[in-house]
Amino acid sequence: MPITYDSAAPEKTNENHRILDQFYPPLTQGTTRRSPMRELISTVLSHRTTHADEELAYDRMLEAFSDWEGVVAAPTAELAHAIRTTRWPDTQAPRIQEILRRIKAERGEYNLDFLEEWPTEKGMQWLNDMPGIGLKTASLVLLFNFRKPVLPVDTHVHRVAQRVGMIGPKASVEKAHQVLLEQLPKDSLLLLNFHKHNYWHGQKICFFTKPDCARCPLKGFCNYYREHYGPATAEALAATPTHWDPAWGSLPH
C-alpha cells in the first residue's frame, strides 16, 4: 500500500534534519553505543524503563549469572529478580531466555555479527520473528551496530515528528518508521543522526508536558507551536538558540 502523508511533511522532515544537524553535536560513522548482543538485550530491558534502571538490571543479570549460558540456565524467577528494576521483569525474564535460546539454536553461538552480511530486510525479519522484538529494537540493532539504512522511532522521535507535522496526528509509532524512512535518504549516517537528534530533542526540549518551545529551533514550521502560540514571529526566531549549550545539561546516551 502506498504511503500517504501531508504534502508538506517531506519538506518538514528534511528541514528538521538540516536544523537539528546543526543544533546538536553530529555523530560519526564510528559511533556505536554497545555490542550487538548488549544492544539487543538492553533494548528489551529498556521498555518503559529509565536508562539508569535498564543499566542496573543488565549489570545485575550478568553479575548473578556470569554469561548468556548462565542467563539461559537460570531459574526464571531468579532472573526476574535480578532484572527487577525494569518495568515488567516477570514478562521480560522468560522472553530474554527464549531470545537467547533461539539465537544459540539457529546460529550456534550468542553472536549477531552475521547480520552485517545479511540484507537489511532479511535482518529485520529475523529479528522481528523473535519474541518481544519489534521494529524499534530491530532498527536500533541494525542501525547502531551494522549501519543498515533503517530508522528507529521511539516515543521521543514519534512525539517530535507528530508535533512538527512530519507524520500525521494519528500515525502510530509503527507507521512512523515507514513514513519517516520514506521521506529521508537511505544513508545510514544521516539516519543515525536524524534518530539521535530527534531523540535528544524529545528528551531535552520537546517534553511530553510543557515543551520548551522558546528554546526550540523548529518553531518556524512546527504545527504545535503555531497552534499554541500562532506563527513564529521574527523576534521569536531571532531569540532562538542555534546550537545546544552544554550548560543546559548533558545529552542522553
Image: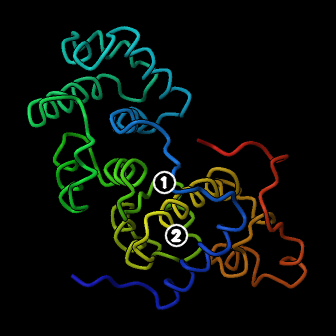
Q: Quadrant of residue 2?
A: bottom left
Residue at the farthest bottom position = 7
Q: Is residue 184 left or right of residue 108?
A: right
Q: How many marks?
A: 2
The amino acid on which the numbered mark 1 sits, given as a three-letter code, is Thr
Quadrant containing the C terminus is top right
Crowd rating for badge 2 (residues with CA inside 10 Å; few <14, some 14–19, many 20+): some
- Rendered location of residue 215, percent (x, y): 79, 63
- Rendered location of residue 197, percent (x, y): 60, 59
- Rendered location of residue 123, percent (x, y): 22, 54
Q: Secondary structure at mark 1?
A: helix
Q: Residue at x 27, y 42 (%)?
A: 113
Q: Residue at x 74, y 66 (%)?
A: 216
Kindly identify which residue carries mark 1: 155
Which of the two residues, 192 or 168, is positioned nearer the viewer here? Answer: 192
Q: Secondary structure at mark 2?
A: helix
Residue 208's label in the rendered image is none
Q: Is residue 60 left or right of residue 1?
A: right
The amino acid on which the numbered mark 2 sits, given as a three-letter code, is Gln
Asked whether the beta carbons under mark 2 and mark 1 sit within 8 Å of each other, the answer is: no
Q: Is residue 42 depicted above or below 192 in this figure?
A: above
Kindly identify which residue carries mark 2: 162
Q: Residue at x 70, y 58 (%)?
A: 211
Q: Is residue 172 depicted above or below 34 in this figure?
A: below
Which of the two residues, 184 or 248, is positioned nearer the viewer here? Answer: 184
